[in-house]
Image: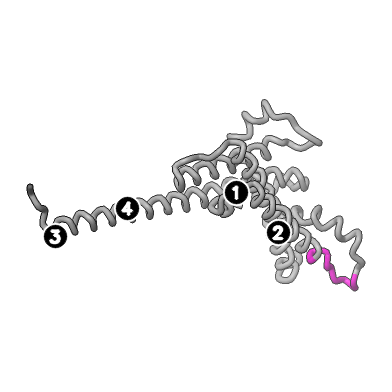
Amino acid sequence: MTVQPNWLNNWANNLGFFWSRLMIGLNTAAIYVLQTLGSLYLLIVLMRFVLQLVRANFYNPLCQFIVRATQPLLKPLRRIIPSLFGLDMSSLVLAIIVQMILMALTLLLMFGTTGDPLSLLIWSIIGVTALFLKIFFFALIISVILSWVAPASHNPGAELINQICEPALAPFRKIVPNLGGLDISPILAFLVLKLLDMLVINNLAAMSGMPDVLRLLM
């Protein structure tokens, strides 16, 4: 019976440890790249739905970019998905599909399984809804900052931000009195959006059993 030297056993153990750590690192890097690039495209797709919802100016260069980036996948979907209330629902459906793919791949890389399709669909709807609220939340923040530093800006980005915020602020402006030129409607909008995220989105995610790793995609 041949006894291997201790140095050889140590070398083999160190090599195995290094290899396992390398695989974990590569897996983590793959998840990071997937979530970063996938979330960026998901944002662009959902923005396409938001643009038509707020009746944005599609001649805006940023709107044109969003249209070009989403058109290849939306074109075939429009043939099978009907419009609803004058809105092209294919962009919303595509956002849910992209979210499902992102979540399935994340689970596959983390746990070696894509999970239950029905659960994935529920989690994806919750995730897309959370992102929808965040679009308006951060648009409001940018709008408030722009109103201080560049109130008369005609930049395409500023124009788009204002077009997104106006429909969200309109209901609050009807119930909030004018305080001598001070518009506090964004504060109420912030509170409502934050409460919806905390009380509705987070509870739905918990009740549906959404894994913590998938909440990073929300």
For the residue pair 133 and 68, the one nearer the viewer reads as 133
Q: CA distance from mark 1 to mark 3?
A: 46 Å
- Mark toward the start of the polypeptide (1 vs 3): 3
Q: Nearer the viewer, mark 3 or mark 2?
A: 3
**Residue pointed to by mark 3:** 7
SS type, badge 2: helix
- Mark toward the start of the polypeptide (2 vs 4): 4
Cβ–Cβ under 8 Å for marks 2 and 1? no
Q: CA distance from mark 1 to mark 4?
A: 28 Å
Mark 4, other Cα within 10 Å: few <14 / some 14–19 / many ≥20: few
On the image, which quarter does residue 71 sit in? Answer: top right
Give coordinates of residue 8: x percent, y percent. Answer: 14, 56
For the residue pair 44 and 200, the one nearer the viewer reads as 200
Mark 1, other Cα within 10 Å: few <14 / some 14–19 / many ≥20: some
**Residue pointed to by mark 1:** 210
Q: Is residue 142 magenta?
A: no
Which label belongs to residue 112? none
- Mark toward the start of the polypeptide (2 vs 1): 2
Q: Is residue 184 magenta?
A: yes
Task: Classify residue 92 as left or right of residue 100.
Answer: right
Q: Which residue of the protein is positioned furthest toward the top in this rendering?
A: 79
Q: CA distance from mark 2 to mark 4?
A: 38 Å
**Residue pointed to by mark 2:** 198
Q: Is residue 135 visible?
A: no
**Residue pointed to by mark 4:** 20
SS type, badge 4: helix
Q: Which residues are magenta?
A: 179-187
Q: CA distance from mark 3 to mark 4?
A: 20 Å
Give coordinates of residue 22: x percent, y percent. Answer: 33, 54
Instruction: Indicate whether 195 appears above or below 204.
Output: below
Q: Residue at x 74, y 66 (%)?
A: 144
